[in-house]
Image (cartoon, rainbow, N blue to C red):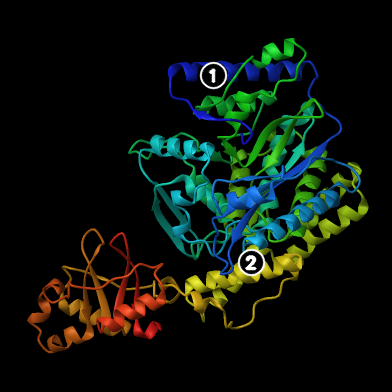
Amino acid sequence: MGDLNVTQIKTKKDQSNYIHHLLNDIKALDIMIEEGMIEAQPQRIGAEQEVFLVNDQFLPENKSLEFLKKINHKNFTTEISTYTFEINLDVFELKDSCFSALHKQLDHLLEQAKKVAATQHIKLVLTGILPSLSINNVGDKSMTDTKRYSVLNEIVKKTRKRGFNVHIKGVDELNLLHNSAMLEGCNNSFQSHLQIKPKTFVDDYNWAQAIAGPILSICTNSPLLFGKELWSETRIALFTQSFDMRVNSYLLNEKQSRVSFGNQWQTGSITDIYKDNISRFRGFLTTNFTKTSVELLKEDKIPRLRALHLHNGTVYPWNRVCYGITNGKPNLRIENRYIPSGPTTTDEIANMVFWVGVMLGKPEKYSNIHEKWDFKDVKTNFFNAARYGMATQFYWDGKYVSSFDLILNELLPMAYKGLQNAGISADDSEYYLRIIKSRVHSRNASEWLVRNYRHLLKSHKRFEAMQILTAKMYEKQEEGIPVHHWEMLTPSYDTTYKHHWIVKHVMSSDIFSVNKNDTIELVIQVMTWKNIHHMPVIDTNEELIGLVSWKDLECYLNDVEKQKNSISDIMKTDIKTIEEYASVSEAKNIMKEYNISCLPVVKYKKLVGLLTLKDF
């Protein structure tokens, strides 16, 4: 819907007019399908590349509007956050060396982008979730200032009536209450499009659902969010929760999220897929309409189905049905939305080739798969792949099989056959599918990121480790070598970040605190057990209200009776604090001026870290 001048539906007249055109779009699509107007041949491919902008410190840089204005190119457009943008690639006919041609265009456009970015002292990073992102980057101030995004954000907030409670469990756990749809801006993907023949569309769509889990498992690239190690492809969980307009209640909520894998196989006609979405999700955006799509068909004009296009842009299945017009002829395609951006363009095109090959190479035994497989097995496969990546065990064709065996023994041969039947050059097929095969035998991007992040945490605080990881990923990306060739990082780094250090770089975030009603005896024991010299005190709202040092407790060590008193009786309440994005020099000056050895770090009065002389 990026090419539409959208406004929010506010009146009954707006609603009625929008629904009228939406239902006419469905009628028009049915007419075009029945009369054979939807193009079946030639098949085509296309893609959308989402890109992160970072500064010299490899932190997100909010300059997308300035960058896009300067590059001034029809293939470039905005995304929801001001530290991302999107490249829309051209449509290529599915034949010969179309994938290497698409790859060449992508590299060419990125090179143009890099030159413009360099003039603004910014770099481009391809990845699903930027490792150096922090919660400070996902507020409304980082939202792109266009009506499309502000309206979406306003409606999501109004519909939910409360913040987003994002809860993702992996090796670590993220439990976050957020008040903006900007969490969506953490996710970058490489969206692949494949035009599908109308006669086989529904069966092909079900096949796309069936293979989504195995395809995703080898492509994962987003294991980290805000320094937490979560799912192999954390985007799947994050996007689902960051744009969930359902309101939590004590009643069982049976509604489906707008970001969804779906709950059942598709049956019936192509328009039934659209009808299901329209039935489940109400539209909240509209635009200027003139004639209905049915009226345009009567005038021998091909309609754009603007209302349907608008509705489709607010519903986000991981495999999405899309209608478009190419060379004046209408067509239908499947948009693959679950594959992440990066880590190199070569890896991205290999992912796309693998997906398209498996789509085209479907054996006859998997036709009408909705009659043979349980949809819940397919859905389970998808979410297991998002969680575990290449370590996934899939329930496939009635038995459990590893990602390793399924890809090597069945899906890769299937992809080779599908591409060969479509007339794809042997050079393209062999080059890109060999990358997938090598990745199976080695590692994908999630595995590389996780192993190196754990390694970096042994010698660096979390925030700096996130920067280093982003920097090293950028270096590898610039070399253009596929991720399965990437070497593991060496033990330590003398970074340049120290010249720009903020409190977040050096503070301790894994901290212990006590409640104001805890006894002095308990506090003494905790500080002894954990060998710590300062203990923050919080109230029932988890707000920082005091601080106790070991010196404050020394006089109570042999007084059993006084140890039964509450820590609130002896804590210091006149305490100096600092926020996490303040400079380290500011923190040092405060500690020196007030002759203190401990400085609590707070955000909205909540304790988020602790800074001591030892940390320096």
Give the x, y percent position of residue 139.
44, 52
Residue that sits furthest to the left in the current view: 561
Task: Read off the residue under disc 1.
Answer: 19
Q: Quadrant of residue 587?
A: bottom left
Of residue 115 and residue 210, the one placed in the foreground of this image is 115
Q: CA distance from mark 1 to mark 2?
A: 47 Å
On screen, residue 243 above or below 573: above
| Mark 1 closeness class: few <14, some 14–19, many ≥20 residues within 10 Å | some
Q: Disc 1 or 2, which lies upstream in sequence?
A: 1
Of residue 550 and residue 216, the one placed in the foreground of this image is 550
Quadrant of the image containing the C terminus = bottom left
Q: Nearer the viewer, mark 1 or mark 2?
A: 1
Q: Which residue does the image show at 44% across and 17% down from the upper left?
A: 12
> The residue under label 2 is which amino acid type?
Glu
Checking the image for residue 447, the label placed there is 2
| Mark 2 closeness class: few <14, some 14–19, many ≥20 residues within 10 Å | many
Give the x, y percent position of residue 423.
92, 43
Of residue 545 and residue 6, the one placed in the foreground of this image is 6
Give the x, y percent position of residue 594.
24, 81
Checking the image for residue 226, the label placed there is none
Q: Quadrant of residue 19?
A: top right
Q: Which residue does the image show at 83% across and 60% down from the upper left?
A: 434
> The residue under label 1 is which amino acid type?
Ile
SS at badge 2:
helix
Q: Which residue does the image show at 38% across and 45% down from the upper left?
A: 163
Give the x, y percent position of residue 527.
27, 81
Q: Is residue 400 left or right of residue 457?
A: right
Quadrant of the image containing the N terminus = top right
